[in-house]
Every structure is written in structure tokens, then in C-alpha cells.
Amino acid sequence: MKELLTLFLNNLLPIFLIAGAGALLGQFLKIDPRSLSQLILYILSPCLIFRLLTQNQLSGNLFGRVILFSIVFISITAAITWLAGKLLRIERGNLSAMLLATLFVNAGNYGLPLVLFAFGENALSYASLFFVVNISLAYTVGTLIASMSSVNLWKALLNLVKLPLIYAVLLAFLITKTGWVIPLPLERATKLLGDATIPCMLILLGLQLKTANISGKVLPISLAASMRLIVGPLLAIVLLPLFGLNGPANQALTLQAGMPTAVLTTMLATEYNSEPSFATAAVFITTLLSPLTLTPLLFLLGA
């Protein structure tokens, strides 16, 4: 019981405290959530991804296997969610928001500390790479999904090309492949901006809490929560042996696959007007329920 309380205090409570500060700020000041979402999307997040990609220490073989697993995992999750949504006749806007809520996980500010707490430094490299892949796909594929809820495919693709994140990823791979040394001013600037990303995401979540509304959306939110917290880790348990990922890699990636919905889905939904109230409700509910699923998962993984 003491260990569970420590888990909550060290990993969940900070999330709720920062989001609560954002909610209070939104209550007393007239702050436009979209302005903050644009700051995160166009400046802060590209810096975070650039730093994570240029600092990862995994070998080339493991690096490739973790990336491939992450892509396959997200693809299968998307197929299951889309099929379930179609069978249940969920309308286009909610289906788009539901895809965002199930595909992209809170693998950063929640997942990374939890992996470190449970499995140590060795597992953290795998968890970090999963986070990079997940957030990179969120800002590319996720942007496409969010855009398509309100615009056609061509405009959605144009929105994708405008994202600085794409160029941050390309620059990071160029630097790692060539062995270039990042100039100190650039390194320090990207570190400062990257470190601000997760707190700003949580503030945005708090600002959006007042818009959380599950009225008439109980079915899609329930489906999203089930996919994120139950189906996700079960799917990872099945897939990981196929990629030869065992030991700390298995522990870290299975745990990351069971994380709640990523805070950035709120930001994407806000930016592209893709049911932001649904996205906020999904983040809040899955985060609130996550201790009920992550605790037995930690026990199963031998934490």
C-alpha cells in the first residue's frame, strides 16, 4: 500500500497539481487556450523532439526494432479503433477525436518517470525512444487526423508540411548520422525550450478542463479509455516477443503502451477544432483511471 501511495505522489499528483494551476488561471484570467497550443506546437515541441533524438544512446539494431514496434503498435491500435468506431456508427468528428485519444499516449511526463521509478535507468532508454516515436507521429499523423475532422485531405496534408516538428526530426537525424557537434548556443536554447514543453502541455490541459464534456459521448470515451488502458498493454504483450524485445525493453514498452491519453491531443484538438472538449475529457478520464490498470500491470511486469 505504501508503494502504491508513493507511485501516486511521485507520478500522478504533480500532473494534477500543474493542470489544476492551469484551471485556476483560466478561471480568473481570460486566456486563449489556442495561443498556448500554438506556442507548444510551433516552438516548444520541436525543440523537445530535437533534443531527445540527438541524445538517445541505444544501438542501431535496438533503435530500429523499438521504432518498428512502436509504428506497428500504433497502426494496429488505429485499425481496431477505426473499425470499432465504424461498427458503432460514431460520427466523423468524434471518430477523429477518438483516434487521437487512443493512438497517442502520455509517454513523457507520466510514462518516463514511472518507467524510471519501476525499472531503472536501463529501461528508460527504451521508454524515451517510444516517447519520441509516439510524439513524432502525434505531431504528423495526429495533425492529419485532427485536420481531417474539419478540412479535406489536401488541406490536411498542407497543415502537415507546415509543422516545424518535421524539420526538427530531419535535422536531428542528420546530426546523429554525420556526427556533427551541436553549437553550444543552439544546444542551450533547445534545452530550455524543450524543458518547457511538458509543463506547458499540462497548463493547457488545465485551461481546457472547463470544456470537458462527456454528455452524449459516453460510448466513444468509454471505447477510447478501454483501448488506451486495457487493449494497449495487452497488444504490446503479444507484439513485443515478435520483435525480440525482452527484459527491460519488454517492461518499459509494455508499461508505455498502457499510459493514458496524451495531453498533446488536447492541444491538437484545440488547434484544429477537432472536438477539443472530447479530447480533454478523454485525457482527464484516462489519467484518473490509470492507477487502476497500471498497478496490476506493474505487478505483472515484476516491478
Image (cartoon, grey):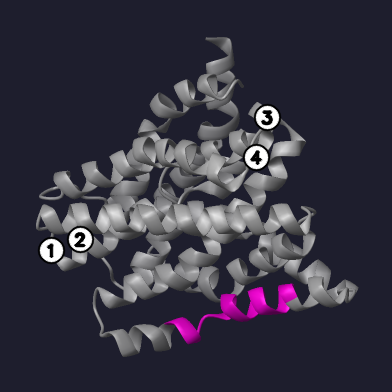
Q: Residue at x 33, y 88 (%)?
A: 155
Q: Which residues are magenta?
A: 160-173
Q: Nearer the viewer, residue 141 or 217?
A: 141
Q: Which residue is mark 3?
A: 119
Specify few, some or many for label 2: CA neighbours under 10 Å numbering under 14, 14-19, or 20 or more: many
CA–CA distance in space, label 3 to label 1: 41 Å
Specify few, some or many for label 3: CA neighbours under 10 Å numbering under 14, 14-19, or 20 or more: some
The first of marks 2 and 4 along the sequence is: 2
Q: Residue at x 72, y 73 (%)?
A: 173
| Residue 200 shows up from this direction | no
Residue 138 position, x and y percent, is 47, 64
Q: Which residue is mark 1?
A: 91
Q: Is residue 220 left or right of residue 281?
A: left
Q: Which mark is residue 249?
A: 4
Q: Amino acid at mark 4?
A: Ala
Q: Which residue is mark 2?
A: 94
Q: Amino acid at mark 3?
A: Phe
CA–CA distance in space, label 1 to label 2: 6 Å
The first of marks 2 and 3 along the sequence is: 2
Q: Is residue 130 left or right of residue 224?
A: right
Q: Are marks 4 and 1 in contact (CB under 8 Å)?
A: no
Residue 170 lies in the magenta stretch: yes
Q: Residue at x 60, y 58 (%)?
A: 67
Q: Amino acid at mark 2?
A: Asn
